[in-house]
Amino acid sequence: MRVDLLTREYPPEVYGGAGVHAGELTRALRRIIDVRVRSFGTPVDEPGTHGYGVPQPFRGSNPAIQSLGTDLLVAQDCRGADVVHSHTWYANAAGHIAGLLHQVPHIMTMHSLEPLRPWKAEQLGGGFAVSSWLEGSSIVRADAVIAVSRAMRDDILRVYPEVAPDRIHVIHNGIDPQRYQADHRTAALERFGIDPGRPIVLFVGRVTRQKGLQHLLRAGFLLHPEAQLVLACGQPDTPEIAAEVDHLVEGLHRARPGVVRINEMLDGTSLRQLLTHASVFVCPSLYEPMGIVNLEAMACGTAVVATATGGIPEVVQHRRTGLLVPLEHSRTGEPVALDTFARELAESINELLDDARLREQLGKAGRARVETAFSWGRAAARTTEVYRSVLNGR
């Protein structure tokens, strides 16, 4: 069986959880079946992996139109596949068109849903309507849909009621516990000027409204003064969100010492060292269907504070592997009570900063949960079962 896996992100061009997922799942699947990866961006020096740039006529167009142009190139090259498997709206159209063109099943893994990310309109403008249309058109015709959490499955059924429940399969993201484990070396801390002798509160994520960074920054004014707030930030979605975060960081710098901002994607070694030395890892996401980064923190034995939204409670168990902060959304996707959310976020972080024994207990339980409940081998085996069931059903 040959499967063509279609994705915008693939290592080394990874900026979020979907890219991590695509890389790790491919590695695990290739132990079982033939997988050809077709990813956006620079061609990858890896057997069976192909990169696709934006076609010349679409360069400079709205990002959604650029993606659609690239999708056409990808779809054309899927000839010979038994199954096409797309990840995120960027590649969903490629999978949908390839399925029709080559008369093979199309399977989609849903990492998020466009209609539940209204702030993307800031980034894409009218392209947000295009991305939503591409996702919706593809999912209603897909032969099977893989949801990365039970919460994501519920969201799919709510947003796209045309999708039959029996076509949706829940397969959680995995983690490689051999790769992600405690690394007590301090090279990364020295590189970024982080004091290993002071408590560290760590955030890792993109500068986008979805990740809730601006709310963590507001909570930062309420954190214990001895704590360092380390912000490992990816590229901002828009100039507006970049300016908002810059303003909050500057204000926090004036109010307290120990604010460290890292404006780059971390390499694996640096990430593991920061996660290991963090007293608390914080995931303040407003929308998070799964959240691989929480698994990475737990695998390094670090206690987690996260919002009780989406698939996070399926990973972080309240008062067993971390603390969950309640979140009630407004129609815009933002918290209903901004001050309350920031205060409760700070209170949970401070509780763990005050209680080393609890931090250690949660960290050990988190590592144990990663080892027993999440693995890419299990995810790959279940994904292959979906491939075979769809093929047998044709």
Image (cartoon, helix red, strand yellow):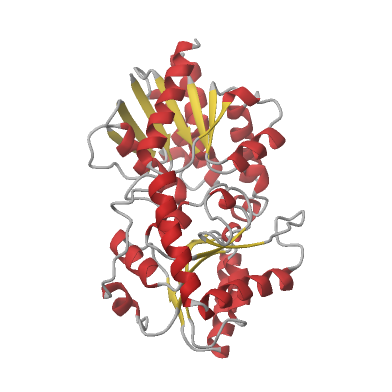
Q: Which picture quadrant has residue 43?
A: top left
Q: Is residue 381 left or right of residue 304?
A: left
Q: Which residue is painted at 76% across and 62% down in the image?
A: 336
- Seen from the viewer's position, the closer of residues 38 and 223 is 223
Percent x, y of residue 148: 52, 40
Relative height, residue 355 to residue 77 (above, below): below
Q: Is residue 317 left or right of residue 235?
A: right
Q: Is residue 52 left or right of residue 240?
A: left
- Seen from the viewer's position, the closer of residues 364 and 125 is 364
Percent x, y of residue 75: 43, 26
The total number of labels drawn is 0
Relative height, residue 106 to residue 146 (above, below): above
Q: Which residue is painted at 45% across and 56% down in the image?
A: 293
Q: Which residue is painted at 37% across and 85% down in the image?
A: 197
Q: Is residue 35 left or right of residue 251?
A: left
- Seen from the viewer's position, the closer of residues 141 and 271 is 271
Percent x, y of residue 294: 47, 57
- Whether residue 201 is visible here, answered yes or no, is no
Relative height, residue 306 to residue 127 (above, below): below
Q: Quadrant of the N terminus?
A: top left
Q: Which picture quadrant has residue 219?
A: bottom right
Percent x, y of residue 40: 39, 41
- Whether residue 28 is visible here, answered yes or no, is yes
